[in-house]
Structure formats: C-alpha cells, structure tokens
Image (cartoon, helix red, strand yellow):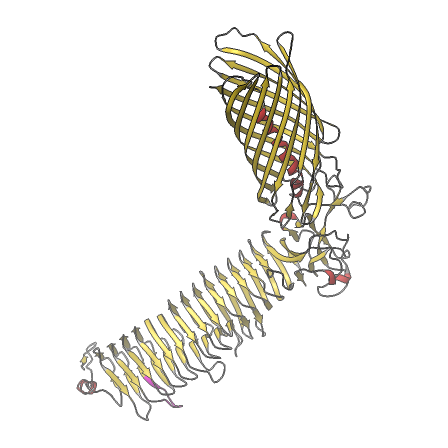
Amino acid sequence: MVVHCYRRRAVAAALCGVFAASASATEFPYGILVEKGTALTLEPGDRISVSGLATGRVVTVESRGSFDATDVSIENRTSGNPAGYAYGVLAFDGSEASMSAGSLITRGDRSVGVQVQGASRAVFAGVQFTTLGANSIGITARSGAAILMNRAHLSIDGRDSTALVAQGTDAAIVGLADIEHRGAASAPGRAQAIAVRDGARISLSDSSVIARHANVGAVVIDGEASGFSTSRSHIVAEGEHAWALSGTSGRAILTAAELRGNGGAITTRVPGAGTLQVDLLGGSRSVGDIVGGDASLVLNAEDSELRGDLHRAGTGSLDVSLARSRWLGRARGASALTIDDGHWSLTGDSVLGRLTLAGSARVSFPEGTGAFSTLRVSHLDSQGGDAAIRLRTRLDAGGALSRQGTDRLLIDGNVDGTTRLEVAAVEGGGAGTAPGSSGGISLVQVNGSASDTSFRLAGDYVVAGPWRYGLNAYGPGESDASQRLVAENGSGFWDYRLQSTRIDSQGRWRDVLGRAADSTSPAMPARDALAPQVPSYLVLAGALFGYGRVAIDAAGADTFANDGGPTFRARSFGGNASYRNSLGFTRFGFDSIRRDRGLQVGGDLASFDAGTWHMRSGVSASLGSTQVTPRAVDGASDARAQGRGLAITHTSSGDDGWRIGAAYAFTHYRVAVRTPRRGETLARLRVNSSDASLSAGFRWAAPRNVVVEPGISVLWQRLRFGKVTDRDGIILQPGRPERMTARVGARATRLFPVQGQRVSAWSAFLDGRIEATRDTGAALALSGVRFATGHGGRALHVAAGTTLAFRRAITLSGDINRQVRIGGRGDSSFGVRLGAAIAF
C-alpha cells in the first residue's frame, strides 16, 4: 500500500516520511493526521484501522489540509467518552476531504463516522458508512461546513444514534443517500435518522430514509432558519410511535416525495416552541397522522396527497392548505383548513376552526352505507361559488332528529359566500315530508350570520325514487329550537333542510294543504314534484307507439301500385305530433310533443299472379328517430330514440276489386333521456317493438276516372323494455305495454289523362279515416312506484297525395297527412312522405 505526500499551496507536509512509513501498515493505533496546508492521497485497497482503549481518530484533517481516498477501508474500533467522541474522519477549519467507494465503520459507543466543521468541505461518492455503537452519529456537518454525497449508504445500528446531522448556521449536507436506521431508542427523541438544527440545512434527492425501530424518527428539524428538502425520495418511520417528520421550527420542502410514519407523518408535539412549515409539492404523498403540539405547524400541499388525521394536541396552531391536493382523514381540532381546487374526504366526525373553500374545492363525507358523520367548523368561507360539500342522506320523511339519517355540517360561527351541497342518497325511497322548520332533514345549521343563498343544492334538486327534494332555508326565529345542534339555545340559528317539493299545475310551491308560500293565493290542487326526467319516462311508450305506427304505415303504403314485376322502393317520412293526456295533473298525466324522422329502403321479393289475383311480397329496412318532449311543470326533459327496423309486407290484388294487405315490422330502439341540469340521465335504455297490421279494401270505379276504395285496417303493437337504472338511481320497470288501433274509411283516387312522352301516368288521391285505440299495460313502475302512462284515443285522419309514373319504369310519389284527435286524449299530428320506385 502506498501513501503519497506532496506540498500544497507552498506549505511543506510535515513529517511526510513518518506518514509514508505508517501508511504501509494494516492498523495505526493513533490514526493519520493531515496537518495544516498539506495533502494526503490514499491508493485503492488501503486500509486504516484504529483500536484500543483510548478514544481514537482514524483520519484528522487540519486547517486547509486535504484528504483524498478511493476504495479505502476506514475502521474505528474505539469508543468515545463524556469528554469527546471517537471519529472516523474529522475535518475542520477550511479543510477538504474526499472519499469515493470504500467503507467507513465505527464500532464503539459515542463515535462519529464523519464530522466536517468550520467552513470545511467534504465529498463522499459511493461510500458505505456503518455505525454500530450507541449514542453515535454517522455523518455530521457543523458550523458552516458543507458535505456533498453521491450515492452514499448509511447503516445505523447503535442505540440512541443519528445517521445524519447538520447543525449550525450555514452548515449543509447535500446529495443522494440511502439511509437505514436499525438502532433502537431508549426514549422518544433520543434517536433519529436525520437531524437538522440551529439554522443548518440538508437537501437530498432520489434518496431513501428508513427508521425501523419504535420511537425512532426519520427526520427532525429544530431552529427557525433550519431547512430540510428532498425530491423523489422516500422518508419512512416504521416503528411504533415513530414519526416521519417532526420538529419545533424551521422548514421542510418535499417534492415528488413520500412521507410515511407508523406513529404519524408530521408532528410538532415535541418539547419546544416556534413554527414548523412543511411544503408538500409536485406529487408528494404523506401517509400517517399530522399532529400539532405547543409549536405551531403550517402545512402547505400542492398537487399532493395526504392520508391520515389532523390533530391539534397543544397550544400551537395547526394550519393546513390544500392546493389541487387530496386529503383522506379526520380533523380533530385543526385551527384552519384552506382547500383550493383540492378535495378532502372525511373518514369520520371532524372538528376544525376556519374552513376556507376556493376554486372548485370539494369536501365529501365517507362513502358507503356506514355510520353518518358530522363536520363542525367555527367559520366557513366559500370563495367563488364553485365549492361543494357532498353528504350522504337517507331520503325519507325525516322529522325529529332521532328519525333523521344524514351527514351534517354544523357551523358555530358565520358563513361567507355560497356553497353547493351534493346529496348522495344511501337509503330510503323518498317520501313526502312535513312542511315547515320541523319537517324533512336538517343538512346544515349555522349559529352566526348566513343567508338564504349561503347553501344551494347541486343541480337544484335531489332525487329519491321518482320524487324531487329541494333545500329550504329557515332563518333565525323560523327554525325549530328542538332541532338545534349548533352552539347556544333557542331558534336563533339558520337551518337548511332537505324537504320534498309540492307544486301546483303552474309549478308554484304548495304545502300539503295546497296553500302557497305567500299565504295570499287561494288553495289549489297540488302533488309531489317529480324528478324532471320522470315525465319523459311516462310519455316514452306512447311516443314509440306513435313512431312505430308512422313507420309501418310508410312500409305498407300502396302508393306505388304496380301489378307488373318486382319493384325497388325508397321512402322518407317525417312529421310532428302533439299528445294530450286525460289523466289530469294530480294523477301525473303529461301532454307531450313528438317529432319523427325516418328513411326506408326495400323492394319486392316476389311478384306473381295466381288466377285472378296478383301477389306482391317485399321487405324494407328503416332507419329513423323520434324525439318526445313532455309538457311538465316538474322541469324540462326530453327523450330521443334511434330506431332500426325491418318490415315484411304482402299485398294481394284481385281482378274483382278486392285488395288485402299485411305487414309485420320489428324495430330496435336506443333511447336516451336528457335534462338541462343533469344532462343525460338515461343513456342505455334498449326497447324492442313488434308492429303488425292487416287491411282490406274494395276498389270501385266511379265516373270521370275516379276510383273509390273503402277499407278497414287493424294495427297491433307491443313494446318490450328492459329493466334499467338511471343516473339518479331511479329504477325503470316499464313492462310490456300493448296497443290496438282500428281504422275505417275510404280513399278516392283521380286518374288524369297524360299526353307527354315522359310521363306515363298521373294520379292524385284524397284519403279519410276514423281510428280508435285501446291500450293494455299502460303503466310504468319507477323505483317501485306505479304510474299510469295514459292511453291513445280516437282521431280523424286525412291525407292527400299524388303519384307520377314515368315511361322508364320510375315512379315518384308524395303525400301529406293530418290527424286530429277526437275527444280529450290522443294524438294530433301533421306528416309528409316522399318516395321513389323503380320497376324491373
């Protein structure tokens, strides 16, 4: 082994020859001394070991000295005493030390692996540090010294020991390190992985710090100007009652780091006073309780996550700010919480001081059907109006407090701004609530100043079964003193209650006796308000029956009479209809308007003669849509159905004037229901329909090229719905409604003479029919509540159209039709059909 000595800054290395001779030995009982202004370099493989009963130093670097070692083993087997420590490397007063690879082991009690002090500098790259003795330190920088670590590894096994210590103004430790503290602690605070004190700082990146025993903390910070920062690192305290980060003052900044403690994540519940500030940034994660003691704790989380409770357990304040961050846990006496575009998920009853909600801040009570929770705050400040609090509620009649089941917000002070309340129904199928301040369910109570607009329901209403609940505010003097849960006594508080809504036919609020809120309007019939989408559910079956009738009429329309060969056909149809329901307002009858659009293509599969009869059988495919909008004071909504269908038709025409027609159509619908507030409340309803018609008529030739054809027809329709649940939890069970329609009437057709070379035939017709319908199964179950859906009625149907046949076997046709209801229920409509056919 070789030791090189050389002059540094023109100062001779004293006793260089002595050092050279000593360095060749395996052990040096008195270590190596690098004197002032000299430099020493050890070669790879060198080994320095100090042992004995006296306190020893392996390497001492004096003022302005320099020590360099590569792949060298340094071992100190001595122990310190109350008067001083045993050292592996001690550098002070502007000296420099550098080690790469190799190892440094201290085995005795009260030993220090490396101590750099007094404006000295040290660099350690890939060095393995091991500390085995009790009351020892792995690496420490003091009094303005700086240490740079590059993938250093520290293992601490001694009791009441510390891996990394930075102490004193301008002392700093920077770099990458993996620290494992396996030593025990004789009492809390006697051992930790990292300690930063008295204005020093430690900055680590891509590192790991693990403390494994009970009462052994990972990072401890003390001193107003002390600082600890880390990025992309893991800070873990695994033992019982062990904290990942603790202190009384200073600042810790963690970026994209994990902080996890078995005893807790962060605490100032240690002896001392001051303010500790902790910043969690850029995807950091804190797991474990956060507890404030006599020292104040300020926690700022940005784009990060907290898991654990907040607990104020001393005289210091505990202030937490969440910016675009998430927190899962309870608050137990925290001084203030600010949430800016963040989310707090409560895990149980919570109490805190001032709660400030900014941006799209969100507070949500526990999910599921467990016990309900209460959040009590001293002041609520909701800034911007986009903040929301989500509560679980059992939606029933409510009433007395003992009969209510809900999460609840209690505010002992004032409320500023407006907060949205999101109510999640966890139980209950909805029920009418008693009117007034004792009815329904109390969600929020405020002891201080507030207003009618301090809270509003998200979406303006809550749905339970098919019913709609609203939020009613009862101010001081109106609220029920027997239901008071906020501080003090009496009715001088605000109570925001969830109550079922009753409306009259004009959409105005009414109580159970039909009285209006202003008490001056006369009593009127009233009923419970429905969720806005429910009227669309109730008129949907009638709308699909109407569209199906229009589609099968178009498929079987004999506007292309042709006794020749097979024909290819294309038709478009469309129209608007209005439906009048006779059930009445209190029986949930709804009028509606409907718009139909469709296209059909098809042709004859067979065309042949059988004696005096000509037969034609064909098939057609259709693609169309219908939109129905109920006229409801409960709220705006509409249903839109996309239909794809296939129809089979057959027509038999006899030479004696008789004509018989039959058609069968199968249509599959995809239905979506929307409301302005909720958007799409039902997106995946599938409906299948079967439509079958049979008609008979007799053609009679009248004078002046007029053909009169009286006739009769029957149409049978059936819908098959699947069971489905909408986004508000309403369960639809429509069943299988059926409708039968009978028509009787006549058509008169005028044939016009044609003399041109292009047109071979031209005719016009006028058609008049009387129809009547009969419905079965016209009901709909919504979350177990059965509603009648109304019936069809009688109507007068008239149509007029024309047909042009060209000499090249092309036929064009068009007609308009008008239907007028007869009586108090049924459809009135107007429609148009256009078509073209090519005969082969």
Nearest the viewer among 408 and 715 is 715
Predominant SS of the magenta segment: loop
The residues colored magenta run 78-87
Q: Nearer the viewer, residue 146 or 499?
A: 499
Q: Quadrant of residue 527?
A: top right
In the rendered image, residue 113 lying in the magenta stretch gets the answer no
Quadrant in the picture for the N terminus? bottom left
Residue 441 appears left or right of 280: right
Coordinates of residue 675 in the picture (x, y in percent): 61, 42
Q: Nearer the viewer, residue 335 or 662?
A: 662
**Compared to 97, does 665 lie above or below?**
above
What is the total number of numbered labels drawn onto the structure image?
Answer: 0
Please provide percent x and percent y for residue 648: 55, 29
User: Does 253 sit above or below residue 716?
Assistant: below
Using the rendered image of the protein, determine whether residue 171 is visible from the camera's viewpoint.
no
User: Is residue 84 a member of the stretch shown in magenta?
Assistant: yes
Query: Does residue 267 appear in the picture of this structure?
Result: yes
- On screen, residue 138 above or below 684: below
Residue 510 sits above or below residue 626 on the image = below
Percent of width and height locating residue 802: 58, 16
What is the quadrant of residue 361 in the picture? bottom right
Front position in the image: 727 or 414: 727
Residue placed furthest toward the bottom: 53
